[in-house]
């Protein structure tokens, strides 16, 4: 068993117990940075809920498991993972959730990167949570619960996957925060380029830079910090650039190229 699986043993046991007992929380929030096994756990949990055997994990051979594997299960809904989550998407999800399950005993909805919901989307989501649809389980994912409105977090059953070992801090937290705030300031682009160079040396440094940047942006959207001239629209645009930068790093593009591209687009 690798370190990630060993670290997640407690979470796996908790999720399997829910399935065996049939006593599901109607709204769950899986938190943890990329690389912690969080999203695989979400998909396994969703598959196990829809599975016919109720053993705590997908059997992979029943009709429901085969539909999940093919991406055609009518009661398995997915949203997010591709940037900003708009209010129209949440409303469409809401309509689907209030319909009775078609194939399985429950409907399961996964909202990936829920921290990328706009303010209007988050408010619409809150209305769903205030009147949970019967026989439905809604699962949100986010790197950190602090990136979501407290009104949503307080209604959720949190499953915490923490931080991946590769993302352990390699710079002093206050230094990274100060550097990111300076880069977001109205400075000439060449000065920002110079400041970001030290985070281009190694992938863990680049990932940490992106994590801190995302946290600052989300706090600004929630009114917990002030970014001056940054409108909500611009903040959401930068959040989308952060997600694209993560994908670029995952595909092994140069850290220097990824961060410089980000800075050029942020302006």
Image: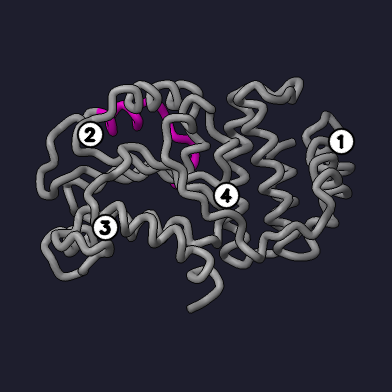
Q: Is residue 182 visible?
A: yes
Q: Is residue 82 visible?
A: no
Q: Earlier in the sequence, mark 4 or mark 1?
A: 1
Q: Are marks 4 and 3 in contact (CB under 8 Å)?
A: no
Q: What numbered label is drawn on residue 188?
A: 1
Of tags 1 and 3, the one toward the viewer is 3
Q: What numbered label is drawn on residue 233?
A: none
Horizontal relation, residue 159 to residue 106: left or right: right
User: In percent of the image, x 57 and y 43: which residue is there?
Assistant: 144
Q: Which residue is mark 2?
A: 97
Q: Earlier in the sequence, mark 4 or mark 3?
A: 3
- Label count reads 4
Q: Are marks 2 and 4 in contact (CB under 8 Å)?
A: no
Q: Residue 149: horizontal and vertical position, in percent?
A: 53, 28
Q: Earlier in the sequence, mark 1 or mark 3?
A: 3
Spatial distance from mark 1 to mark 3, Cα to Cα? 50 Å
Spatial distance from mark 2 to mark 4, Cα to Cα? 30 Å
Q: Which residue is mark 3?
A: 47
Q: Secondary structure at mark 2?
A: helix
Q: Earlier in the sequence, mark 2 or mark 4?
A: 2
Q: Secondary structure at mark 3?
A: helix
Q: Residues within 10 Å of mark 1 (few under 14, many from 20)?
A: few
User: In percent of the image, x 58 and y 36: which residue is there?
Assistant: 147
Q: Residues within 10 Å of mark 2 (few under 14, many from 20)?
A: many
User: In percent of the image, x 66 and y 33: which residue is there?
Assistant: 217
Horizontal relation, residue 162 to residue 37: left or right: right
Q: Residues within 10 Å of mark 3 (few under 14, many from 20)?
A: many
Q: Earlier in the sequence, mark 3 or mark 2?
A: 3
Q: Which residue is mark 4?
A: 244
């Amino acid at each position: 068993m690798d370190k990630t699986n060993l670290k997640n043993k407690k979470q796996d046991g908790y999720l399997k117990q829910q399935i065996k007992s049939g006593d599901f929380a109607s709204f769950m929030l899986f938190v943890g940075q990329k690389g912690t096994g969080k999203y695989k756990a979400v998909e396994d949990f969703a598959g196990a809920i829809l599975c016919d055997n109720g053993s705590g994990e997908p059997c992979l051979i029943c009709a429901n498991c085969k539909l999940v594997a093919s991406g055609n299960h009518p009661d398995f809904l997915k949203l997010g993972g591709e940037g900003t989550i708009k209010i129209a998407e949440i409303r469409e999800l809401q309509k689907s959730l209030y319909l009775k399950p078609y194939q399985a005993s429950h409907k399961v909805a996964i909202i990936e990167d829920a921290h990328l919901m706009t303010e209007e989307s988050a408010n619409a989501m809150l209305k769903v949570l205030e009147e949970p649809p019967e026989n439905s389980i809604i699962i949100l994912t986010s790197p950190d619960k602090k990136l979501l409105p407290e009104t949503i977090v307080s209604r959720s059953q949190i499953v915490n996957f923490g931080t991946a070992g590769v993302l352990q801090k390699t710079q002093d937290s206050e230094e990274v925060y100060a550097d990111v705030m300076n880069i977001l300031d109205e400075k000439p682009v060449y000065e920002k380029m110079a400041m970001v160079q030290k985070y281009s040396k190694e992938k863990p440094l680049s990932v940490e830079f992106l994590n801190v940047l995302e946290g600052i942006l989300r706090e600004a959207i929630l009114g917990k910090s002030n970014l001056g001239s940054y409108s909500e629209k611009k903040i959401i645009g930068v959040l989308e650039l952060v997600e694209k930068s993560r994908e670029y790093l995952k595909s092994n593009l140069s850290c220097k190229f990824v961060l410089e591209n980000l800075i050029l687009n942020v302006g």
